[in-house]
Structure formats: C-alpha cells, structure tokens
C-alpha cells in the first residue's frame, strides 16, 4: 500500500459514487450456514424485480450508478444486465457466486473472477473495469488477490473496508483510494467510506449500518467526509435491502436475523433522501479520471 490518490470532492459540489451489489437475499454471506448453494436454484428469486425498482428510482432522479453484479445473477437474468447498461449505468464484477476470497486459493480466485468477468462482458458487450469482493473479503492476509485482478485487466477494486468487524475489515488500510500493488501504480483500491473520529474509523458507506443508524447521522458523516476530508464518498446497498416482503429464513441466529432484517421497510425512504441530499455518479466517472498521486497515506 504505497500511494494514496486524491478524491473528487470540492467546496461547491462534491460528487460521490453510488454502488449496488447485485445479489439476492439468499446469497448473503451470513446465510451460508443455513442455505447451501445447491439450493439457490430452487428458491424464489427476487433480485430481478428489486433491481428493476432501483433502476426506476435512479432514473427518476437522473442518477448513474455502478452495479457490482454476480456472474450467477447475470447468467440467470441476462436481460437485467442489458437494462442496467442500456440505462447508462456502469456494470462491474462481484465474482461468480458470492464466495468470499478468504475461502479461495489464488488459483480458485483467478478462475472465479475470470469467468464472472467473461460472463458480464459477453452479455453486456462492454469492458468490465471494476471488481468488488464478496463481503469485502480482501484484507491483510490475502493481498495476493490484487495482482491477480490487475492481471485480469481490472482498473479498480472496491474490496477493502477499513473497519473492525467480525466478518470482514482491515482497519489499518488507507481510508481513501490507493494503489495496493508493489509497483505503486496500475490497479486502484477504492475502500468503502468511513468517517474518522477519535482516531477510529466508523462505517458510513451503506449496508446494515445505514439501516441501523438514524438517517441524519449517516448524512452528517458523509457530509463530513466531503467537507473535512475533501474526499468523495462511496455508498453501497443491495437489492434485497429495499424488499421488506422477502421470504424470511427460519432457524438463523439472532445476530444474523437482526442484521439482515433490520429496518428493511425504511430503506427505500432513506435511500430516496440520500439520492436527494448528495450528488452521485459511477465509480469509473468519479475515480478513474483522477491521476494526482500523493505519497502520504491517511
């Protein structure tokens, strides 16, 4: 981790990156002990209709976003992939079947991402520039993944969350864009946004934290990143998070149940406010045009 890259925020109109991790409710990592992958084809899928709702929501506000899409979803719903691209959004890679990088060897990772990238490019007819690991599962112990992504032709990754968490996180990583390979150039890593308070990083880039915390607190934290850090925020969410009527899983732990189902009924209202209160664009548009490099890492 050699070089930190400047963001795009300015005093007048900071532009932030809106991202969607396109996966279905039964594919989340927390459900792995309860829902085997062999059962996925037998479960009622809701990812297509939920993603179409998101596309309509974005269209209503003229917002372009990056859709990190599973190869599994793309093969099953190629029409959805085409609608994402036809609407002017950026299509990016979320791996093949939501396997965490911590569960893969380098060879398994390379083949997983290579195949997923090929599926997305074949359906969309467009190059895939970005990658996001399932559950932000690149960290201090598997940095070998970055040279592989570079080898496969990716220009950026958004796979590190610089926080402490029981399922993921690399709190010592830079909070903002940096080059993760030894050469100090090439592939960019674009961590999901955190706010720094009292020497600690706190999540403010979406996911369950956005549903847990009151919206004004999330808005304050992101505005602080724009104004104090002078950096663009990266926000993410999933199609199943706007779907309070999704099938409920039985037999899951209390912590998993709390994290997954908390405030699903409030998510779309909060998301609508977020789209109104900030300026948004794709990951590629926000970050790939920036070339100023700083040797200092925050």
Image (cartoon, helix red, strand yellow):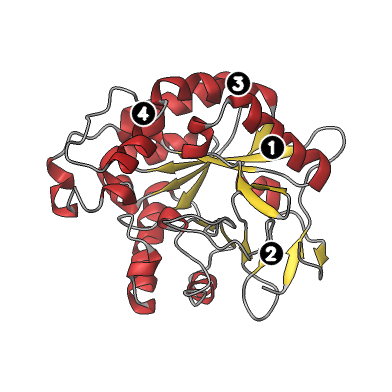
Alpha-carbon span between mark 4 and mark 3: 18 Å
Depth check: 62 or 132 in front? 132
Tell me the quarter of the image containing the C terminus. Answer: bottom right
Query: Which residue is the site of mark 2?
Result: 178
Give the mark nearest the N terminus, 4 or 2: 4
- Please tell me in which quadrant of the rendered image residue 203 appears: top right
The disc placed on residue 156 is: none
- Please tell me in which quadrant of the rendered image residue 234 appears: top right
Query: Which residue is the site of mark 4?
Result: 50
Q: Position of residue 185 (x, y in %)?
A: 70, 73
Q: Secondary structure at mark 2?
A: strand
Determine the residue positioned at 62% across, 68% down. Answer: 187
**Front label number (4 vs 1):** 1
Alpha-carbon span between mark 1 and mark 3: 13 Å
Give the mark nearest the N terminus, 1 or 3: 1
Left or right placement of residue 173 versus residue 5 in this view: left
Is 283 located above or below residue 147 in the figure? above
Alpha-carbon span between mark 1 and mark 2: 20 Å
Q: Position of residue 137 (x, y in %)?
A: 44, 61
* Disc 1 to disc 2: CB gap under 8 Å: no
The disc placed on residue 273 is: 3
**Front label number (4 vs 3):** 3
- Sort mark 4 into few (<14), some (14-19) or many (20+) by Cα contacts within 10 Å: some
Is 143 located above or below residue 161 in the figure? below
Q: Secondary structure at mark 1?
A: helix
Give the mark nearest the N terminus, 1 or 2: 2
- Sort mark 2 into few (<14), some (14-19) or many (20+) by Cα contacts within 10 Å: many
Give the mark nearest the N terminus, 4 or 3: 4
Q: Secondary structure at mark 4?
A: helix
Give the mark nearest the N terminus, 3 or 2: 2
């Amino acid at each position: 981790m050699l070089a930190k890259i400047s963001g795009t925020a300015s005093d007048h109109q900071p532009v932030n990156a809106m991202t969607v991790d396109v996966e279905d409710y039964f594919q989340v990592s927390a459900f792995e002990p309860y829902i085997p992958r062999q059962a996925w084809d037998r479960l009622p899928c809701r990812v297509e209709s939920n993603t179409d709702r998101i596309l309509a929501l974005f269209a209503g506000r003229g917002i372009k976003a990056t859709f990190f899409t599973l190869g599994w979803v793309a093969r099953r719903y190629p029409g959805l992939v085409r609608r994402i691209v036809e609407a002017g959004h950026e299509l990016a890679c979320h791996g093949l079947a939501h396997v965490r990088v911590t569960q893969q060897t380098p060879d398994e990772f390379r083949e997983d991402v290579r195949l997923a990238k090929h599926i997305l490019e074949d359906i969309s007819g467009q190059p895939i520039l970005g990658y996001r690991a399932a559950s932000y599962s690149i960290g201090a112990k598997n940095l070998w993944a970055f040279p592989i992504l570079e080898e496969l032709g990716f220009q950026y990754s958004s796979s590190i969350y610089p926080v402490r968490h029981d399922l993921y996180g690399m709190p010592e990583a830079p909070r903002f864009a940096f080059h993760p390979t030894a050469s100090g150039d090439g592939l960019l890593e674009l961590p999901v946004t955190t706010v720094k308070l009292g020497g600690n990083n706190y999540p403010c880039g979406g996911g369950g934290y956005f549903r847990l915390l009151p919206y004004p607190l999330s808005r304050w934290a992101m505005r602080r990143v724009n104004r104090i850090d002078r950096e663009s925020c990266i926000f993410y969410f999933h199609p199943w998070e706007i779907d309070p009527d999704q099938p409920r899983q039985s037999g899951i732990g209390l912590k998993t149940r709390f994290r997954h189902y908390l405030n699903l009924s409030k998510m779309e209202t909060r998301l609508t406010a977020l789209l109104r209160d900030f300026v948004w664009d794709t990951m590629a548009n926000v970050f790939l045009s920036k070339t100023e490099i700083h040797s200092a890492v925050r």
